[in-house]
Amino acid sequence: MKERTVLRWRLAGLLIAVLIIVALPYVVTRDSAADATRARDWVTHTAEVRARAFGVEATLRDSEAAIYAMLAGANSPALDERAKSAHNETVELVRQLRALTGDNNNQQVRVGSLESMTIGRITLMDQALARMAAGDKAGAYASMADAARLFAFRNTLNAIIADEDKLLAQRRVEAQRLDRNNQWILFGTSAAQIILLVTLVVLSERQIARRLEAEAVARFAVQRSGLIVQAVREPIAMLDARLNTLLVNEAFGELYGVEDLTVSVPLSSLGNGAWSAPALLQRLSDVLARDRELWDFEMNQRTVDGVDRTVVINARRLEEPGTEHPAVLVTVSDITARALVEQRVNELNRQLEGKVEQVSDVNRELEAFSYSVSHDLRAPLRHIAGFSSKLETHLAEVADERARHYIDIIGTSARRMAQLIDDLLVFSRLGRGALRLQPMDMQSLVEQARALVETEAGDRKIEWVIAPLPIVVGDENMLRTVWQNLLSNAIKYTAHSARARIEVKGERGRSGDWEFSVTDNGAGFDMQYAAKLFGVFQRLHRASEFPGNGIGLANVRRIVARHGGRTWAEGEVDHGASFHFSLPASDMGKAFSTGEAA
């Protein structure tokens, strides 16, 4: 759109320039011609005024000369005609003179004066002719003398002619000025024409250069496109309206045995009949006739190398420039390897489903076994604990120190075994129970867990640092168990610290999940054994140092994993430890934590 606008402005500028080049000389020449015509008219006008003025004088002088000749004794019809012609001719000349000077008031006054003088002079001349006819020559001479004396018109004629000469001089100066202006205008017009012509030539050269450059770029683009098409390893072909090849790349030629890529051949004859399937040819014809695109048409073809291939064919119609007939672009994707891989993947998926089912069965059996064993072990343990207590009561004072020590070991071991069985049952239930997800305040859960586990600290002073915690979505009972285990561990492993400090934090991780941590300044652990911390019955300290059965952190990991999170730990011997777990951030939890749910 922008290029079209620029082109339109260029064409408009070119048209304006041409109009200026053609019209400006015409306007200037026309004005110059008009000025010259006006100057010529003024010169002619002045000449006519002079001619009429001198005509008046000549006519009167000629009539007077004829009268004097007749007074001298000459007598002829011609002299008589000359003497009498002054009246009519002079009146006509004065009328013409009045008409010629109609645009000049001063001249009109002079012409009026001249008219009065000529009339008076003619009247006296007629009087002289009348006296001469009566034989009074002396009276005739007196009339002629009076005419010359009373009606002297020479000064008036000179004033008329001088005024016209003055006007003529002014008009000549104006004409010269206009001529000089016209010459400058013609010079400027010629310079403008030269500049415009040079500009047009330069712009034309630039336009031609740009067009040549654009054509070169277009040719290069076409060549590059051809090279790209030929270099593409995916078979590509362009077909005409009769499904004959217009262009095929080398990959197409290699796959379907096209020896000469420039020769047009029917598509159905390529690849030993690989393209002769009626359904495929019909679909390609529909692409040409109805402009229906062909997408992911999958079929099996046997190519010239005798290999059965699974291919996906795509086709769409193209409008060829310079022709009314459309073409169709066909691309072929060899998905034989992918089909084999998909077949193998499907087979592996079926095998995996079987393995998953087997694992599920094994897990269910293991859970049932652990639950059954735990229940079956309870009765013998109750018997051991009960009879050891009865034995201690029965022996009473009879038992020596060694017997009482043995009885105490039996009772302690039975109780410890019962606790292990209870913990194993809890661990088993964590894997079976359904999650009851709901929004809950982690701050409240931490405070509840803290109240429950602080009894384990006895009289110890513990510094608690609990940061503001968010609202998350999870199973309340299970997450309460997580916090109880983590806080109980922190209290237990800070037992030998002079001043215990436990810090609880929750913040957003890089992935957007919530990450919680419990950090203490207790015994810590060696990081090379960190992988064992979350295993069942795994301990890094002796029971004599720190009591416990090693299943609490395993419960934490299992609960967090069921919520879609992960667990990890960091620590250093005698410098404390940090236990971390993450929970996915849900939209519901985010809404409650920001107050949007209200």
Image (cartoon, rainbow, N blue to C red):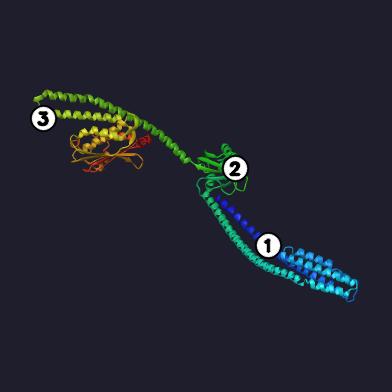
**From the viewer's perspective, is residue 19 above or below residue 589?**
below
**From the viewer's perspective, is residue 93 above or below residue 539?**
below
Image coordinates of residue 211 in percent, x first then y, are: 58, 56
Viewer-nearest of discs 3 and 2: 3
Q: Measure how far apart labels 1 and 2 are at the Cα level.
A: 71 Å
Query: Which image quadrant for residue 493?
Result: top left
Q: Measure how far apart labels 1 and 3 are at the Cα level.
A: 146 Å
Image coordinates of residue 419 in percent, x first then y, are: 22, 29
Q: Measure how far apart labels 3 and 2 are at the Cα level.
A: 105 Å
Comes first in the chain, label 1 or label 2: 1
Pick the quarter of the image with the C terminus.
top left
Which residue is identified by label 2?
243
Q: Is residue 340 left or right of residue 395?
A: right
Which residue is identified by label 1?
31
Which residue is identified by label 3?
402
Indicate the amino acid at tag 3. Arg
Q: Secondary structure at mark 2?
A: loop
Sort mark 1 into few (<14), some (14-19) or many (20+) by Cα contacts within 10 Å.
some
Q: Which mark is residue 293?
A: none
Q: Secondary structure at mark 3?
A: helix
- Count of numbered circles on the image: 3
Camera-side residue: 401 or 429? 429
